Image (cartoon, helix red, strand yellow):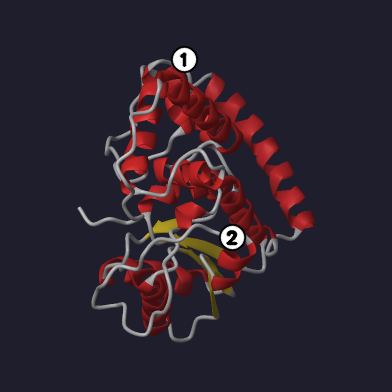
Amino acid sequence: MAELYGSSPVKARRTQQEINSLKLGLVDIVEAEQPMTVRGVFYRSVAAGLIAKTDPSYKVISRLLLQLRRDGVIPYSWITDGTRWQIKPRSFNGMEDARIAMVRMFRRALWNDQDAYVEVFAEKDAIAGILSAVTSEWDVPLNVVRGFASETFLWSVAQDIIAIDKPTYLYHFGDHDPSGLLSAQDVERRLRGFAPDADIHFKRVAVTTAQITKWKLLTRPTKTSTHHRGFEGESVEIDAISATRLRQLVTDCIERHIDPDRLDRVRGVEAVERQSLEIALATWGKPA
């Protein structure tokens, strides 16, 4: 495994007191920003001076977070892992269970009454659990491209943009490294190619050089690859940005396109329709 953060001299094993102190620090970090990725917790720990920026230190953080969850100190839901998922059809215990679920899941399409349309792109699936808390609230598609997106996937996104036929704002979140920069450029180029007449506005939101300087983000050595030519300096993973700040960034991107009066009307209609749906389904499956 290639070293991402560098190595460190061999040091004495941590005492139990030091381990307990580190655990307390991890609990404070995760409680303040949850849900977080393991790598995000590692970066916060380094920034807080709890641990060195080395590969062995990352493994220590990963192991302690696992222990804290297994011991019931922090909930499993506080650590997000977007790299694995499960495919299963929705099923119910019975008609009453289905009725309750249908009422809860009912939502009006928020963007139909807005003048613009928004989608968010994440280069890494690991941060999907952080961004989705916001994108789901605002009914915004979150596209996880996992590096370089496939032709089929981007063609499908482009077809949606064409069908919606309104100014479309696309926001990309990814690492500041050769692959991250090229990934964003690749997404924009191919979407414009698939939808040449669409009014597309593309912005790479994070990680930027300005953010690295302003927020003093932790860096790592840039990997040598076919993409690194022309890239200068060290790389910065998007996990180096705090989960709280990432959620605020994506919130700002979305909210600037929301007309509050139209939003209030949509939510008002949604509440009335949800109540009507609940009444209509109350007798569902019952004898007339």
Q: Position of residue 285 (x, y in %)?
A: 43, 19
The residue that appears at 48% across and 86% down in the rendered structure is 197
The amino acid marked with disc number 1 is Lys
Residue toward you, 281 or 167 = 167
Residue 236 in picture, x, y percent from top left: 45, 62
- State left or right for residue 104 relative to residue 70: right
Q: Nearer the viewer, residue 42 or 134?
A: 42
Q: What is the number of the mark on residue 207?
A: none
Element assignment for label 1: loop
Question: Looking at the image, can residue 33 be seen?
Answer: yes
The count of marks equals 2
Instruction: Measuring from the top left, give residue 119's x and y in whole percent.
Output: 51, 62
Q: Amino acid at mark 2?
A: Lys
Q: Nearer the viewer, residue 116 or 148?
A: 148
> Residue at 45% across / 61% down in the picture?
219
Q: Which residue is mark 1?
A: 286
Asked if residue 82 is positioned above or below residue 272 in the image, the reply reads below
Q: Nearer the viewer, residue 190 or 167?
A: 190
From where the camera sits, is residue 285 visible?
no
Q: Residues within 10 Å of mark 2 (few under 14, many from 20)?
A: few
Q: Which residue is mark 2?
A: 216
Q: Position of residue 152 (x, y in %)?
A: 27, 68
- Mark 1 or mark 2, earlier in chain: 2
